[in-house]
Image (cartoon, rainbow, N blue to C red):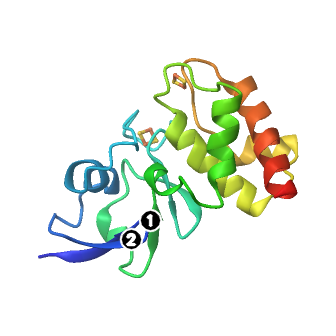
């Protein structure tokens, strides 16, 4: 039986089993392939999106856990929004190496900066626990600082 799912401001009718992980609904049903599959056990953060603004891992999160009124935002929904300073900082500082983890990383950072516009090192460490096999952690931290400054100056 179908149900509604709101992603990046658009309401979709989706007809998939309620225990399907949200990640696969986004990628396979809606074609939003910017969100990646890494571990499948909620450990790496590659599959992170925003649900009502909160960073949320989706690889083992059943579709039924998302209410029809809730707002899901993926990396595709960020461009041109007030959250864009994060992606801008990422590009300016060439953060990505292979890039595979980076959309999930960026979504975690967007949620972090919404809660902590000028995050401390401890807040960054607690809020951005995504894993990066390329070891971009230093550049990620620089880009968080750049995005925070740009957001404050805007
Ligand atoms: S793929 Fe979801 S946390 Fe790793
Ligand atoms: S940039 Fe390659 S895994 Fe993070």
Q: Which mark is residue 72?
A: 1
Q: Is residue 107 left or right of residue 70?
A: right
Q: Residue at x 33, y 43 (%)?
A: 33
Q: Where on the picture, by quarter, is residue 10?
A: bottom left
- In the figure, 46 relative to 60: above or below? above
The answer to whether residue 45 shows anywhere in this view is no
The nearer-to-camera label among 2 and 1 is 1
Q: Secondary structure at mark 2?
A: loop
Q: Gap in Å between the C-alphas at discs 2 and 1?
A: 9 Å
Q: Position of residue 49 (x, y in %)?
A: 48, 54
Coordinates of residue 50 in the picture (x, y in percent):
52, 59
The residue tagged with tag 1: helix, strand or loop?
A: strand
> Can residue 115 be seen by looking at this rendering?
yes
Q: Which residue is mark 2?
A: 66
The crowding category of the residue bearing disc 1, from other C-alpha atoms within 10 Å (few below 14, some 14 to 19, many at least 20), is many
Q: Quadrant of the N terminus?
A: bottom left
Which sits in the foreground, 99 or 84? 84
Do residues under tags 2 and 1 come within 8 Å of each other at their CB atoms? yes
């Amino acid at each position: 039986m179908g149900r509604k799912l709101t992603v990046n401001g658009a309401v979709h009718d989706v007809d998939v089993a309620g225990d399907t992980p949200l990640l696969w609904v986004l990628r396979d049903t809606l074609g939003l392939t910017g969100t990646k599959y890494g571990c499948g056990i909620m450990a790496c953060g590659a599959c992170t999106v925003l649900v009502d603004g909160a960073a949320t891992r989706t690889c083992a999160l059943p579709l039924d856990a998302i209410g029809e009124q809730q707002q899901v935002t993926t990396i595709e929904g960020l461009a041109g929004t007030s959250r864009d300073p994060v992606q801008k900082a990422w590009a300016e500082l060439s953060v990505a190496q292979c890039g595979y983890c980076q959309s999930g990383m960026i979504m975690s950072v967007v949620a972090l900066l919404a809660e902590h516009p000028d995050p401390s090192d401890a807040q960054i460490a607690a809020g951005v626990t995504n894993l990066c096999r390329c070891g971009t952690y230093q550049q990620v931290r620089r880009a968080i600082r750049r995005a925070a400054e740009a957001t404050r100056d805007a």
